[in-house]
Image (spheres, grey):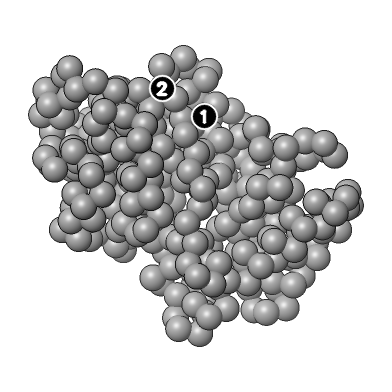
Amino acid sequence: MIVHNTIASLRAALGGAGRVAFAPTMGNLHAGHISLMQQARSLGDVVVASIFVNRLQFGPREDFDKYPRTFAQDCSLLEAAGVAHLFAPDETELYPVPQQYQVYPADAHEGILEGASRHGHFRGVATVVAKLFNIVQPQVALFGKKDYQQLMVIRNMVRELDFPIEIVGCDTVRADDGLALSSRNGYLSPMERAEAPRLAEELGKVVEALRAGRSDFAALEQGAVGALSAHGWQPDYVAIRRRSDLQPAQVGDPMVVLAAARLGNTRLIDNLEV
C-alpha cells in the first residue's frame, strides 16, 4: 500500500489505474471499515481509502480534538484488507485556504434527525466528500449504512450534482451482541458497554411491529423512546422514515427506523431497514 500525503501524488498514482473503488474514513478503523475495503475489492480494479478527520463536520462542543487518531494501526489494517492507495492529507493540504465555498444539502435533508442537533454537520460532510470525490475521481464509492443520513445526503448530492460515481451502501457490521460497531464505542465504560446493545434491540422491536402490520408510527416511536429512557438512556429521537429522503414514512414506503441516544457521555446512533 502506498500512502499519499498530497493531492498531486495521489492523482499521479491513479492515472490510468482503471476502475477506482473509494472508501473515505476518519481513521480509528474497526471491522466495519475493513468490511467496506473488502467489498471495494470486488467493485474496482484498484481500492483507494482516505483518512482525514474533517474539522468542518464537528460542532464547537463536539469531540474533534479528542477524536482517536490511530494512524499506524489503521495503515496495517488497510494494507491487510487489500487497499492499494491511502490518501492521508493534513489540514493544510486539503484546506490550504479557509473553505468558504461549501456544499449545502437541502434543508429538508440536513435539518432533521442528526442535523437537528448537529447544526452544520452535513454541510461539512458534503463539502469534504465533494472535495475527495474531485481529488480521487472514483467510479464507485462505498459508505456504511450505520450513518444512514450521511449516506442519504451523499446519494442525493451525487445525483443532483451529476457526479459520475456509483454510491454503494454497505450493511452495518455488528458485535456479537448486536451493537453497531463505531469508533465512539471505545468511550463506553464496561457497564455502559453491557447496556449498549439495547439500542439495536429496541429498533428491532419497532421493525418487527411494522412488519406485522402496525401503522401507528408515533406510538411505536414513543414506546421505544420510553423503553430507552427507563434504562438510563437520554434519547434524541427514534424515527420511522422513508429511506430515500428520511421524510416521515407512509404505509407502503420502503422504510428505515433510526435512533440516536446518549448513554452516559457517549452518543450512539443506529438504524434498521424494514
In the figure, residue 135 lies in which quadrant? Answer: top left
Quadrant of the snapshot with the N terminus: top left
Res 155 label = 1
- Badge 2: how crowded within 10 Å, few (<14), some, or many (20+)? some
Vertical comparison of 158 with 120: above or below: above
- Give the tally of numbered discs: 2
Vertical comparison of 170 with 228: above or below: above
Q: Residue at x 74, y 55 (%)?
A: 207
Q: Is residue 120 visible?
A: no
Q: Which callout, 1 or 2, points to the residue nearer the camera? A: 2
Res 271 label = none
Spatial separation of the CA atoms under disc 1 and disc 2: 10 Å
Q: In the rendered structure, which amino acid carries the disc numbered 1?
A: Arg
* Label whose residue precedes the other's in the sequence (1 or 2): 1
Residue ranking furthest to the bottom: 191
**Where in the figure is residue 17, as x and y percent of width and height?**
19, 22
**Where in the figure is residue 257, as x and y percent of width and height?**
69, 51
Q: Nearer the viewer, residue 22 or 211?
A: 211
Vertical comparison of 232 with 64: above or below: below
Q: Residue at x 69, y 71 (%)?
A: 228
Res 165 label = 2
Q: Nearer the viewer, residue 112 or 4?
A: 4
Q: Residue at x 26, y 49 (%)?
A: 81
Q: Nearer the viewer, residue 109 or 185?
A: 185
Q: Residue at x 55, y 58 (%)?
A: 269
Task: Please tell me whether mark 1 sits on a helix, a strand or a loop.
Answer: helix
**Where in the figure is residue 163, as x and y percent of width and height?**
42, 18
Vertical comparison of 56 with 33: above or below: above
**Where in the figure is residue 139, as x and y percent of width and height?**
35, 23
Task: Please tell me whether mark 2 sits on a helix, a strand or a loop.
Answer: loop
